[in-house]
Image (spheres, rainbow, N blue to C red):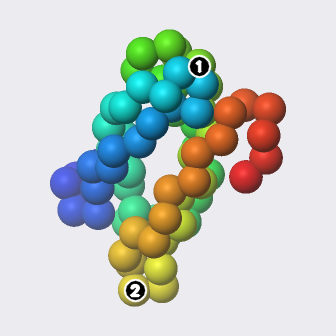
Amino acid sequence: MTDEGVVEWPVNCPYCDAPFTVMLDISAGSYTTWEDCAVCCQPIQMGVTVSIAGELESVALASDDEIL
């Protein structure tokens, strides 16, 4: 993965509310992925929405028992 299309995005864990930063690859469009919290290690579901123009529109976070 190159730096082109990669965005650094601040988030807060839905479990422990700890702030941390994730790197998002928006070059392939919208997607859903999983990221472990950098503090409490709980699995976080992330829904990344990218516009047709290739701009990051939103990042939705959910715990592992929620559905995005």
What residue is shown at x 40% (from left), y 86% (from top)? 53
CA–CA distance between discs 1 and 2? 33 Å
- Give the percent coordinates (x, y) of residue 43: 61, 25
What residue is shown at x 47% (from left), y 79% (from top)? 51
What residue is shown at x 42% (from left), y 15% (from top)? 39
Q: State left or right for residue 59 relative to residue 45.
A: left
Mark 1 sits on what residue? 42
- Give the percent coordinates (x, y) of residue 32: 61, 51
Kindly identify the amino acid type of the residue bearing the numbered disc 1: Gln
- Give the percent coordinates (x, y) of residue 19: 37, 31
Q: Is residue 8 above or below residue 19?
A: below
Q: Residue furthest front?
A: 17
Q: Is residue 18 above or below residue 34?
A: above
Mark 2 sits on what residue? 53
User: Which one is in front in this view, the residue at disc 1 or the one at disc 2?
Assistant: 1
Viewer-proximal residue among 24 and 42: 42
What residue is shown at x 33% (from left), y 44% (from top)? 10
Q: Is residue 17 above or below residue 25?
A: above
Disc on res. 7: none
Q: Secondary structure at mark 1?
A: loop
Q: Residue furthest bottom?
A: 53
Viewer-proximal residue among 30 and 12: 12
- Give the percent coordinates (x, y) of residue 5: 29, 63
Viewer-proximal residue among 52 and 15: 15
